[in-house]
Amino acid sequence: MGRVADPKLAAVWRRRVERQAGSGLSVAEYCGRERISTASFYAWKRRLRIRRAAAGKQVQHQVSKGRALTGGFVQVPLTVNAAIEVCFMDGTTMRVPTDHLSATLKLLRTSQSGEAFDD
């Protein structure tokens, strides 16, 4: 079993990975601008992906044990400046910044009920 990373350091790297993904820059370009090692960037990106997968397995286990909330959702705490990542059964992934959460929830509720979309 590997070391447990400092949660604050993990949060710093999570933000870096998210910023790079939204920057339109290659990893090499982004790391050069931020003056960070590409090896460290890829190592942290992998580490964070593994953590996310492990957390997803835990949520799936809770759902299979009947601990999910109504509608199959599991309540998770949010942090400031965070994004929610929704993974659908068909493999589609949607990242939603928390400042757009209410609009996204309205969209999901509307699409689930089959009603027409309205602005």
Image: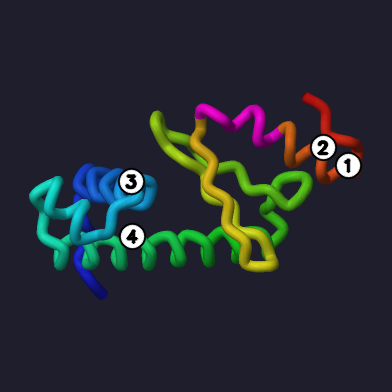
The secondary structure type at the circle numbered 2 is helix
Query: Which residue occupies 89% across, 36% down?
Result: 116
Q: Amino acid at mark 2?
A: Thr
Label 2, label 3: how many angstroms apart (C-alpha)?
Answer: 31 Å
Residue at the disc numbered 3 = 23
Marks 1/2 in contact by CB < 8 Å: the verdict is: yes
Label 1, label 2: how many angstroms apart (C-alpha)?
Answer: 5 Å
Q: Which mark is residue 113?
A: 1
Query: Which residue occupies 51% across, 27% down?
Result: 99
Density class for disc 3 (Cα within 10 Å; few <14, some 14-19, many ≥20) is few
Q: Which mark is residue 110?
A: 2
Q: Which mark is residue 63?
A: none
Q: First in sequence: mark 2 or mark 3? A: 3
Please state, as top left, top right, bottom left or bottom right, where the N terminus lies in the image: bottom left
Q: First in sequence: mark 1 or mark 3? A: 3
The secondary structure type at the circle numbered 3 is helix
Q: Residue furthest bottom?
A: 1
